[in-house]
Amino acid sequence: MKEILNNKTFIKYLNIIVGCFLLGISINIFLKPNTFVLGGVTGLGIILDSVFQTSFGIPFPIWLSNILINLPLFLIAYKIFGLKFLGNTLFATFFLSFTLAVTDFLPEFTEDIFLAALFGAVIDGIGLGLIIKNRCSTGGTDLLAIIINKFLKHIKISKILLCIDATIIFTGIIVFGVRPTLYAVMSVFIVSKVIGIVVDGFDFAKAVFIISDKSDEIGHSILNIIDRGATSLDAHGMYTKNKKNVIFCIVKQKQIPELKEVVADIDGKAFVVIANVSEVIGTGFKGMID
């Protein structure tokens, strides 16, 4: 049992599973009943379900729309990027559909729209945070943005994603009106903050010091895998008097889980210090006058 609990792959998939269940709970208890459209495929699913019930008198379950919308995106992504690119996203996307189906029977919370927006956003943020922390996503608009960026490389993925989600949220205004959409926008802000806390605290960047006998290999991996710059500093131990190389680098908070994984794979005995950074000015972060 102890070996299973210490297994990285088991912990990774357990986090993804818990994250998907939290998303299902958030959507079915708080977001869908109050018509909060936060963007993404599930937001589009809330709109489609409402339109089908109003126009045809039949439901269009979110778990079903999640599969039907993601399926062609996966096929296109497979054609362009290959199966390796999709990785754990396939599992997370279809498991999310499963959790959306099994949590659909849970009681809906509609007594207080503000509390619904607040708790829905917090639970949603924790769920997404657990998934992102394990270097995974649930496909949807993220995948669509990556596909579009393949053909429109001059437009950043973040901007494409913003346009897609903004379009879905605007559609929510047309279908449900302004009031629930304003609460949804508030929820989007809360979700983003909670994701940041779950992934790695409040700060957008971290200063990392790594002391290891395999500093060259670790430094090379930071440059090529994490795509961040690193500096090697000469040092010596005050107790042992041995010469040491210290790697110093600044990474974004969402890259910390990947950095830990890289260091652990190369040198499980490495000494790592991760510190909060209040501001970083330079390439990869922001300019002097930003």
Image (tube, rainbow, N blue to C red):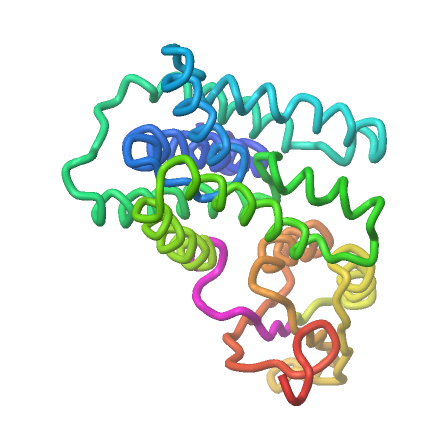
Q: Is residue 99 visible?
A: no
**Residue 15 location, x and y as percent?**
47, 37
**Residue 4 location, x and y as percent?**
50, 30
Q: Nearer the viewer, residue 127 or 140?
A: 140
Residue at 44% over, 44% down: 38
Assign the C terminus to one quadrant of the image. Answer: bottom right
Q: Quadrant of residue 246?
A: bottom right
Residue at 65% over, 83% down: 281
Residue at 77% over, 71% down: 229
Instruction: Magenta stretch: give its range.
Output: 197-209
Q: Is residue 16 magenta?
A: no
Q: Quadrant of residue 231?
A: bottom right
Q: Is residue 56 visible?
A: yes
What is the total number of numbered labels drawn onto the structure image? 0
Q: Nearer the viewer, residue 208 or 34?
A: 34
In the rendered view, tell whether residue 224 sits above or below residue 12: below
Drawn side of residue 182 relative to residue 248, left or right? left
Drawn side of residue 165 relative to residue 125, left or right? right
Drawn side of residue 107 relative to residue 212, left or right? left
In the rendered view, tell whether residue 105 sits above or below residue 42: above
Residue at 37% over, 33% down: 27
Assign the N terminus to one quadrant of the image. Answer: top left
Q: Nearer the viewer, residue 47 or 32?
A: 47
